[in-house]
Amino acid sequence: MVLTPILTAHWDEADSYKLEGYKRHHGYVALAKALKSDPDSIIQTVKDSGLRGRGGAGFPTGMKWGFVPQNDGKPHYLVVNADESEPGACKDIPLMLANPHALVEGVAISSYAIRANHAFIYIRGEVPHVIRRVTNAVKEAYAAGLLGQNIQGSGFNLEVVVHAGAGAYICGEETALLDSLEGHRGQPRLKPPFPAVAGLYASPTVINNAETIANIPYIIRNGADWLKQWGTEKSPGFKLFAVSGHVKRPGIYEAALGTTMRELLEHAGGMRDGHTLKFWIPGGSSVPMLTEAHLDLPLTYEDMAAAGTMLGTGTPMVFDETTSVVKAVSRWLQFYKHESCGKCTPCREGTYWISGLLKRLEKGEGQETDLEKIDELCQQIMGRSFCALGDAAATPFPGAMKHFRTEFEAGVRTAADIAFDPAATTIFSKANV
Amino acid sequence: MTIDNTPVELVTLTIDDIEVQVPKGTLIIRAAEQLGVQVPRFCDHPLLDPVAACRACLVEIEGQAKPQPSCAMTVAEGMKVRTQVSSVMADEAQKGVMEFLLINHPLDCPVCDKGGECPLQNQAMTNGRGESRFDGEKREFEKPINVSDRERCVSCARCTRFADQVAGDPMIALLERGSQQQVGISDDQPFDSYFSGNTIQICPVGALTSAKYRFRSRPFDLVSVPTTCEHCASGCSLRTDIRRGNVMRRLAWDDPQVNEEWNCDKGRFAFPYVQEGRLNQPLVRGEDGLLHPASWTEAIDVAAKGLAAASGATAVLAGGRHTVEDAYAISKFARAVLGTDDVDFRSRPHSTEETQFLSSVVAGSGLGVTYADLEKAAHVVLVAFEPEDESPMIQLRLRKAVRRGRTKVTAITSHVTSGNKKLNATVIATAAGHEVSALSELALDANTIILVGERAASVTGLLTAATKKAKESGAKLAWVPRRAGDRGAVDAGLLPGLLPNGNSLTDSSAREKAADIWNVENNTLPFAAGRDFGAIVHAAVNGELKALLITSVDVEDTQHSASTLQAIENTPFVVSLEIRPSSITELANVVLPVAVVTEKSGTFIDWEGRPRNFGQAIREHNKLTDGRVLAMIADAMDVLLGQQDVAQLRAELAQFAAPTNRVDAPSHGADVPNGLTLSTWNQLIDDGALQEGEPFLAATSRNVIAGLNSKTAAAHSIAEGDLIEISTSLGSITVEAIFVDGAENTVWLPTNSGESKVRTNLGAAHGNIVTIKRGGGQ
Amino acid sequence: MSRVPQIVRGFWVTFSTMFKKPNTENYPEQKDKYPPKPRFHGRHQLNRHPDGLEKCIGCELCAWACPADAILVEGADNTEEERFSPGERYGRVYQINYLRCIFCGLCIEVCPTRALTMTNEFELADQTRESLIFEKQDLLGPLMPNMVAAPHSMVEGTSERDYYQGKISRATDAQIAEVAARAGINANGQV
């Protein structure tokens, strides 16, 4: 496998985040090309390219754009979801830090395609340096006439607003993000109506992940078929894989979809010395975990689904044998309990209950019936919550039980900190030095 | 009433293998109800937008992998729904959600007011598991305010959605997230609503409880009686809960045609007056000039003799709180027994133009514009009418219509009020007294409804203009009085020159018919139209009257309270029929206690013209209706009227046919005041006599302020927050000035709130000239 | 035997009985001799917490459970000035009508705080109907040592939870002083 540096190609240049640096590598050429063509043809190009959403669900981007009703007399909006808060996911933030203009150009092209004159980039509030970078990039683009009124004489107007979130994981859910953007509490909305029909301010709205939008300029510049040279039929293109955890060189590896985890691990320098892989998660804590047996599976939407998990955000987390799986799952559940918005009962109460049970399991104070109970409670949440957060919260435990049942059973009596030395799993542990 | 003939598109689906046809757009949960399948629910409420938050109503839909919320999903042709009755998936989902709901719900049912009538208790029994598997620590909250127990909350958001969607007062909101989510006070909204009581009623757990009802009773103690609200002309259907002869609470009853499932806080909480400080015994003024308790026989005898002796110089001041049966009995007593047409129910400011308007347009007109019409109208024009204060159910219904986006509201009023804002109304800011030209300039069509309020009476030419405008444009016109008994009083003929059901006294055939029904000689009935309330008071002040019969009149309502009291003092013989001691009973010669609404049956006619019957809730042997008391007096005066019980009066009133010769419609030219005018109306929660004894309710009344336009204020060197003095030749009021977005040259005061007692202190009506100046300090 | 005259046979019964142990219980002279069984359903008692606060919270479950409609309860709010029970709610009115009561014990089964229990006392006959309607003061259990009569505040630094977890053992000096002060004020006729 080879890496495919496209979005990441020039990150090592000192001014990669500036307009100048971006323009040096064909920056904003795609915008000029797009503004001369028919918006529908852009939608068609994106459809033809087979680009799928990089936010987790993998919905075909062109199809999403096609849902927006045209000539309905209502304003249209483009919203970029850059509220990257998934545990283990760190790809949009470096992307926006190093290559914000790809996003800005993508926003301009996408807005033109869906006939939106107003676009919002909703960035996670905890990363002010990224917000600054993107804000400056937008400013630069305005100054260069790449945003604003009558862009490059095309008659197309676009206002772009960079919006900082206020620290809620739920606002990564697209409708909760819209509520938050409108100034309400971030809680998911009832669907239908779907955002493509009645989204932001009850107008047709397209919500795309930041990485998805950053792909757009490259596709427009090089054509639909260009993207298909990578990946599989169902998952064409390349992806930012952010490998983290117990590897020697954690980081972002841009590679074709269909790359295997084993290859990614090699690029990341393999497991840290003297340790072996225990389990890994392909894309954020919300997807079920895999083990060594799955290392040779291609990282595509369809293959991951076939393996009973999901590609998710494409940000593999790798854990070695020093990790207590009980503790890991317990941490994730505490995260979901803390981030549950409270709107629906299964998620609000279920995460409260399960995280409590896991906590006592982690302390070795569990009861024999606890494992069965947690499993049932997860089933009680799965598919019954309002949005995907509940489902996500119900995911880690059954996945972990599938592979590490004995460890959970031991957890009933033995505290995780006794079974697994907490120091050994840290990055500064002696074993690692 | 208009009948909607548009065909309903039906959808066929099966629920638990039973085929059912329901209108398109019906929610699955409602379709299931029609089959008698009760799907559990908490957040679902038929009058609130679906939210699908509680997930208690999950059902299985064939072809869908996950159970779906039946409260948010509409039916589709051929859909196959399986509820807990026939689906293991649905049943398990519901039981699972119920178990989740209960893990953080405290087991304090014994101290909780909702215990025994709690949807959570009930549904935990019907759709929950027998045992909880939860053995951890329950979530706890500090208790900041007495009436909110946040740990009991199941986050269904019914209260917040009601406040936001129905009332338009989003004073409460959900705060925090996850299991810490709780209902709290919105930090950017005023904590002020006339409808907060409804949130208590729709709370499916005991998280919101009533300060008044707290710990007072249990549902099995209560006898519930359907009643009608006596506080305004909205005609709300209520449920009065009684424990051992005492009213414990009142709830809104479901009447989709009128109040839906809501009512206002006044209707809900203002009931202590029915028990506290009542007159329990007849009083007769003795030789010593003091009132002494007397037997009914003695009191009736004194009243009869006094009234008989004053024959030819008697008048009746009736007030607006009567049931139509009692109003009819008074109307009949005045004409048939006292032989006088000096009878009027309008204690508040009124005019001869209004008499004419009511006699010609309103009296006997039956059901006119309805709530349903308001919902369907394209345009509703509010003329001299503030629905939020004067008829809160109209406010809610208009808001519902406006939220649906089909109706627009225009208000001709002195300034933009909070109620107008909630209706998204176009406000035509008009100085009080200048409404005629504003109305005339409006372009209206047949899809319009004009609602005129009671204060239109004090603007010369306004009722004429409204009648004319309606006739010209084809718009519908409705008069919305403020008191529950006003419309009934008009129908009963409690106006000079007006017999029951809109018949004119001066129409000889109508008078003959009346004499026939009343079983009296035709010539005992008065021939000429009598004096109205103001003229009666004027005559009495001048000593022209020998006797007055006064029933349920509050001097605070009358144009100038002092003159009214003077009138009573100057009249040698006064009989007062009252429920509680008042400044009038203090001056009366005979005081006869009468029944309050809970102690009698009867009918209020609401503003639509819809009869709102209600039954007797409490049996009190010593409390008689006005009709019965008057029958006894008549008896003692040798005029036999019969028993005059409610049923008999109702049947008798029904004998009055619709008039053949109607009174002419009013035709008064506008008389525009020249100068700074007073705009005033009664706030919903004010110092009204029937609201006494309820401190929790009084605490929700609005601040007493004078509202005026900033330019007008500047012209009088008044800054916002200054104390200003508003005065007439009769007196003055000093209150704080607040700038409002309104017309120039007019100042608004609440009619009867706190320091602002317009009738007592100014003797002024809406549209009268007043003077303002900066007074007092900051 | 048939030859013995009937009258003699009759007297023989009388005579022989004179030498048997009598079956008669001497009630009420010797009522302690045969006390009722421990679980006999007798007159009710409203119990107190160890510091004298009332256990009844006025929930009316007893009234609800009563098949004879013999119980009437009205709850009310405890205030800081006048506290009768731990927590928010107490029974302001508590009446049991012993003309109606059938001593079935359903009321004590449902009592969530064990405030209502039944004693073994069964002597409940009286002359008037009024006297058989027992009020709260008639039903309240006696003040045991270390208890002071409500109203008074909870033991300082405790919550209702501590009461239900049995952490209160007796009235504290502060509570005793508080009740004494209250009584003193009342005795002087001051408010």
Image (cartoon, coloured by chain):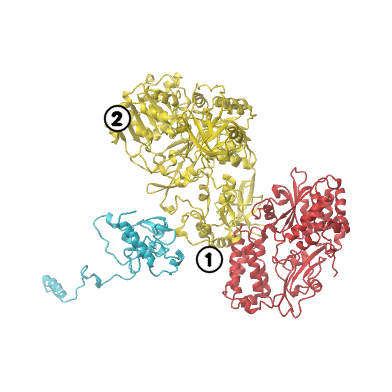
Chain colours: A red, B yellow, C cyan
Among the two numbered marks 1 and 2 on one chain, the one whose residue lies closer to the N terminus: 1
- Compared with B486, A147 (above or below) is below
Give the x, y percent position of residue B21: 61, 47
Q: Which quadrant holds residue A213?
A: bottom right
Left or right, residue B406 beside residue B225: right
Residue B634 visible (yes or no): yes
Helix, strand or loop under label 1 = loop
**Depth check: B29 or B566 in front?**
B566
Q: CA distance from mark 1 to mark 2?
A: 72 Å
Q: Is residue B554 left or right of residue B772?
A: left
- Whether residue B280 is situated above or below residue B635 in the rendered picture: below
- Report in which chain the residue with disc 1 lies: B
Using residue A411 as the reference point, say whether residue B483 is left or right of it: left
Name the disc covering residue B132, or none.
1
Residues at discs 1 and 2 in contact (Cβ within 8 Å): no
Mark 2: secondary structure: helix
Percent x, y of residue C102: 33, 60
Q: Residue B751 versus residue B41: which sits nearer the camera?
A: B751
Task: Tell me the chain of label 2.
Answer: B
| Residue B98 percent coordinates (x, y) | 56, 60
What residue type is disc 1 on? Ser
Residue B140: percent from the left, percent from the top?
53, 62
Nearer mark to the viewer, of 1 and 2:
2
**Quadrant of the drawing holding the N terminus of chain B:** top right
Q: Residues within 10 Å of mark 1 (few under 14, many from 20)?
A: few
Residue at the image point whose x is 32% and y is 24% from the top: B308
Picture quadrant where residue B319 is located: top left
Q: Is residue B123 visible?
A: no
Mark 2 neighbour class, 10 Å CA radius: few under 14, some 14 to 19, many 20 or more: some
Query: Quick check: A150 above or below B492?
Result: below
Q: Would you name the residue on which mark 2 appears?
A: B302
